Image (cartoon, helix red, strand yellow):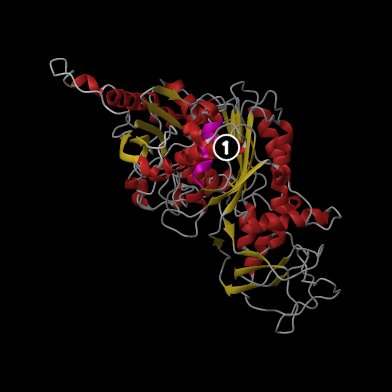
């Protein structure tokens, strides 16, 4: 389509330069007198990127005027006329086109931000100047400068593999505190430490708001990252035209995700989460749902089921069939690696179907009597369904074609509590390593999404220790991925979907325990607030508030006590223990997300596009540029 669009512009410009042929050639007129030397007339054409105010779908601005100072350029004061030749908006989409978002404002804006990032990088590296985007036409002829697009064209599609790490709830303060905690655990002061992704060469910020919300949720934010289109709170894989909870509004609002594009392109695909695999973040890679809470059929209202909407767990099992039904000419082989929690959404509500390590008397929640784990095994007889550490350890990554691992009834354990799992479960690093070793058996490459979902949950519980240790575990997983892949052909992005109301405050001295009480520079004893009591460096704006649970490593234990917000006398409390829950100002049944920007860290092909402050939806466009996901997918189904 892009070739066709630019041909329209070329024809328009050709018409402008040839307009003299349409008039009287004057051969029958009287001879004119010799005139004075005139001023040089110039026409300057400037390419306009996607998202331009005058040509939203890109185009060319044409300035004409008199070059009064004969410098072969047109200053603003010399321009006498300006016109635009704009690429028209898409009004129809053929069956072989993948994007239902061609005219979506956020998608168009994302494409424009990518163009801006290209120019920023080229100018910063001295590869191009601002004149490279202009073509100058004068009486003496036409001079064509190398276009920015041509200068970076060789970089597009260089990433055979794309890995997206999402620290759910991993705001900037969480990254900072985790960095310090890891350093202190290693015997350092902490502040000078670097997490694995701190060392990535490119970084920027992401604006996390949803279309309808200043402070977002994971469903809307992950949909933006995976599709390039921002959407509403609480919906999965659909645009903002959806009405949450209304099944009838799903049709026509579905978006295409980076994982789906990778599938269409023939790449292997994988999803890892320490949360339920049907939870908002992982679900946004594969599902389309009017409500993030429709994880299984028992979570859905009867009218939605009757209207034909399917639950998120069912969509994961039918992913391959759904893709081939949705796209004419598609031939996909399904997701090769699925690992996380959430068994309850795949099993019938019948104790006969309990797993050996079930923690509830009836593990399953499904009310339709379907055992989706058995259905998956039937669909993929060469695949391996596993549910514990033993099964995980038995995988042979060179011969295993695909794996479906559900390691817990609900979410997987917090990293700090993982040793207490009934049957044992792998760490996020172990899952990442195994996934990459399975996926890279495909010579065409792979797409992998890895979520550390329980950073978010520990913050909601008001337990900084749990959130920070899970962030450190994510950093270790990123280091594993970096070690197993090559910067020449693998783009790695690390980011968050949103932050939390988690703060680092006071004036503690260098090396003060990040989970401890504030000790000022030059002092040895904790500082006192105006109320005469000590206070901690980290805390929460809202939430459940104070708990002193000692060595408890399950942050969710805090929900078993009444809300206890406000100030407490911490003089005799060890605030560095795993079970300490920080004070909160505003009493709530659960701590909330925050609305500030979050970090984006990148390395590998296309990583140079990550800079400055971006709409969160731009992350999709970076991945698409690096892997040419849209181009490869469209080519595969033509």
Q: Nearer the viewer, residue 119 or 132?
A: 132
Is residue 421 visible in the rendered image? The answer is no
Please say whether residue 620 is one of the residues in the magenta stretch.
yes
Q: Quadrant of residue 15?
A: top left
Q: Main secondary structure of the magenta part?
A: helix
In the rendered view of the protein, which quadrant contains the N terminus? top left
Q: In what element is the residue under mark 1?
A: helix
How many residues crowd mark 1 within 10 Å: few (<14), some (14–19), many (20+)? some
* Residue toward you, 293 or 367: 293
Q: Is residue 238 left or right of residue 403?
A: left
| Above/below status of 566 relative to 388 | below
Residue located at (64% from left, 27% from top): 489
Asked if residue 70 shows in the view, the reply is: yes
Nearer to us in this view, 294 or 638: 638
Please provide percent x and percent y for residue 609.
57, 38
Answer with left or right where residue 409 lies relative to residue 632: right
Up/down of 175 relative to 631, above or below: below
- Range of magenta residues: 616-626
Which percent across, then down, holds residue 449?
59, 39
Above or below, 526 against 177 in this view is below
Where residue 578 sits: x, y (%)? 75, 62
Farthest residue in the bottom direction?
A: 531
Q: Quadrant of the C terminus?
A: top left
Please name the residue shown 51% across and 33% down the image: 624
Residue at image coords 68%, 63%: 463
Residue identified by numbered label 1: 123
């Amino acid at each position: 389509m892009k070739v066709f669009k630019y041909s329209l512009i070329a024809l328009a410009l050709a018409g402008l330069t040839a307009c003299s042929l349409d008039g009287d050639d004057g051969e029958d007129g009287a001879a004119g007198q010799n005139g004075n030397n005139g001023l040089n007339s110039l026409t300057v054409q400037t390419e306009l990127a996607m998202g331009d105010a005058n040509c939203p779908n890109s185009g060319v601005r044409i300035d004409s005027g008199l070059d009064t100072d004969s410098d072969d350029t047109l200053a603003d004061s010399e321009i006498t006329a300006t016109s635009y030749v704009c690429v028209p908006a898409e009004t129809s989409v053929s069956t072989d086109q993948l994007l239902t978002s061609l005219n979506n404002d956020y998608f168009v804006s994302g494409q424009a931000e990518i163009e801006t990032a290209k120019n920023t990088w080229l100018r910063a590296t001295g590869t191009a100047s601002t004149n490279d985007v202009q073509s100058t036409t004068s009486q003496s002829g036409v001079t064509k400068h190398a276009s920015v697009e041509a200068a970076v064209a060789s970089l597009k599609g260089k990433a055979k593999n794309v890995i997206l790490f999402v620290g759910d709830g991993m705001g900037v303060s969480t990254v900072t505190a985790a960095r310090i905690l890891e350093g202190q655990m290693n015997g350092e002061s902490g502040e000078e430490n670097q997490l694995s992704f701190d060392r990535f060469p490119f970084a920027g910020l992401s604006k996390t708001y949803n279309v309808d919300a200043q402070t977002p949720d994971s469903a809307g934010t992950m949909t933006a990252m995976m599709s390039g289109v921002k959407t509403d709170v609480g919906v999965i894989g659909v645009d903002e035209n959806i009405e949450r909870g209304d099944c009838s509004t799903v049709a026509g609002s579905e978006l295409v995700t980076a994982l789906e594009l990778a599938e269409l392109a023939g790449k292997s695909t994988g999803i890892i989460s320490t949360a339920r695999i049907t939870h908002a973040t992982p679900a946004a890679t594969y599902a389309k749902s009017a409500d993030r809470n429709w994880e299984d059929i028992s979570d859905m209202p009867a009218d939605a089921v009757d209207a034909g909407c399917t639950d998120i767990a069912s969509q994961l099992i039918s992913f391959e069939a759904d893709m081939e039904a949705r796209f004419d000419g598609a031939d996909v082989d399904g997701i090769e690696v699925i690992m996380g929690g959430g068994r309850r959404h795949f099993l019938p509500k019948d104790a006969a179907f309990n797993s050996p390590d079930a923690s509830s008397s009836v593990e399953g929640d499904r009310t339709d009597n379907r055992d989706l784990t058995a259905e998956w095994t039937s669909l993929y007889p060469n695949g391996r369904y596993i549910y514990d550490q033993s099964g995980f350890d038995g995988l042979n990554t060179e011969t295993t074609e695909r794996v479906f691992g559900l390691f817990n009834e609900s979410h997987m354990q917090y990293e700090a509590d993982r040793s207490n799992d009934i049957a044992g479960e792998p760490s996020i690093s172990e899952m990442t390593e195994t996934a990459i070793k399975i996926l890279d058996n495909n010579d065409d490459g792979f797409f992998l999404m890895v979520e550390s979902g329980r950073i978010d949950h520990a913050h909601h519980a008001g337990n900084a220790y749990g959130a920070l240790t899970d962030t450190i575990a994510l950093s270790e997983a990123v280091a594993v991925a970096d070690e197993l892949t090559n910067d020449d052909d693998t783009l790695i992005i690390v980011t968050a979907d949103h932050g939390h109301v988690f703060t680092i405050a006071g004036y503690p001295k260098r090396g003060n325990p990040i989970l401890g009480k504030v000790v000022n520079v030059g002092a040895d004893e904790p500082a006192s607030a105006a109320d005469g009591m000590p206070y901690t460096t980290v805390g929460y704006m809202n939430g459940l508030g104070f708990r002193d649970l000692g060595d408890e490593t399950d942050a969710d234990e805090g929900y078993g006590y009444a809300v206890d917000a406000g100030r407490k006398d911490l003089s005799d409390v060890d605030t560095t223990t795993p079970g300490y829950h920080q004070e909160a100002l505003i009493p709530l049944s659960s701590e909330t997300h925050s609305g500030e920007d979050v970090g984006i860290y990148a390395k590998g092909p296309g990583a140079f596009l990550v800079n400055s402050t971006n709409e969160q939806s731009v992350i999709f466009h970076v991945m698409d540029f690096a892997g040419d996901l849209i181009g490869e997918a469209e080519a595969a189904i033509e």
